Image (cartoon, rainbow, N blue to C red):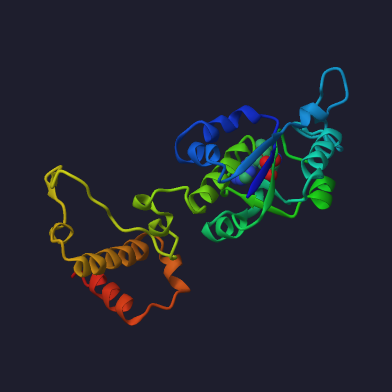
Amino acid sequence: MRVDIVTLLPEMFAALTEHGITGRALRQGLLDMALWNPRNYAGDRHRTVDDRPFGGGPGMLMKTGPLLDCLAAAQREARGRVVYLSPQGRRMDHGAVARLVKTPKLVLLCGRYQGIDQRVIDSAVDEELSLGDFVISGGEIAAMALIDAMIRLLPGALGDEDSAASDSFADGLLLGPEYTRPRQVAGSAAPEVLLSGDHQAIRRWRLKQKLGATWRKRPDLLAGRKLNEEEQRLLDEYQAGK
Ligand SMILES: C[S@@+](CC[C@H](N)C(=O)[O-])C[C@H]1O[C@@H](n2cnc3c(N)ncnc32)[C@H](O)[C@@H]1O
């Protein structure tokens, strides 16, 4: 897939391109990423990219001309689905990430200042996505969160040992507690079953913990879910403290 990012701060994306799993996936070409800066489309001597809002009020908006020209340039070779990262969008979740990673080309529009002119949204944006119900200073961090989450779902991006299929949300549940060496940490022992070598018992224990963690921390995820017989029995046991 290809992701084109419209941003006034392209240098921020080094956090993705130069580090960890995302950096490796980009170097391997699992995802092509291109950065487009509206400042390069500003015609005046000062390369102005902000403008005052009609009607007054605090702050500035992104200047429409450079933004639209930059978007048009990003769309020229192949049209992509335009996502505006915005606090007013639908909140990002695993479903949105899994849907968008199947899109051949995405254009991520990162706002700055007080945001962008409504007519740019109406004419050029296909959907708005939010990182959460709070306001951050620009869309870049939200765009990076989306790209990182999409990369984790691309075949080959993760080694088998940390496959995204076992991540929280992949099957609609949270991941349960995990343990590593040594056996005793902070006066507490790792659960015996995980050291037993009994794969069936470990699978059942892990499933029970996933159901229990989801019930305790995110009951909303269980609300619309029909549990099968085994899942219901394991959740009943968890709730009964067994
Ligand atoms: C300071 S914010 C503007 C917020 C706007 N004045 C409002 O109240 O809706 C500047 C830019 O940051 C990005 N942004 C802010 N909060 C966000 C969030 N929760 N999710 C995604 N993007 C966000 C958007 O691209 C936005 O255009």
Measuring from the top left, give residue 162's x and y in whole percent.
Answer: 37, 50
Quarter of the rendered image showing ligand 1:
top right
Residue at the limit of the structure toward the top, as seen here: 45
- Quarter of the image where the C terminus is located: bottom left
Measuring from the top left, give residue 199's x and y in whole percent.
Answer: 21, 66
On screen, residue 211 above or below 64: below
Give left or right: position of 202 versus 76: left
Q: Would you identify the image quadrant in which residue 48 lies?
A: top right
On screen, residue 165 above or below 64: below
Q: How many marks?
A: 0
Residue at coordinates 27% horizontally, 78% vertically from top-left? 233
Q: Nearer the viewer, residue 214 or 201?
A: 201
Measuring from the top left, give residue 55's x and y in whole percent.
Answer: 86, 38
Q: Nearer the viewer, residue 203 or 185?
A: 203
Residue at the limit of the structure toward the bottom, as seen here: 229
Residue at coordinates 82% horizontally, 18% vertically from top-left? 46
On screen, residue 180 above or below 172: above
Give left or right: position of 225 versus 162: right
Residue at the limit of the structure toward the front, as seen here: 28
Residue at coordinates 47% horizontally, 50% vertically from top-left? 156
Q: Nearer the viewer, residue 163 or 240?
A: 163
Q: Would you identify the image quadrant in which residue 234 lies?
A: bottom left
Q: Would you identify the image quadrant in which residue 135 lies?
A: top right
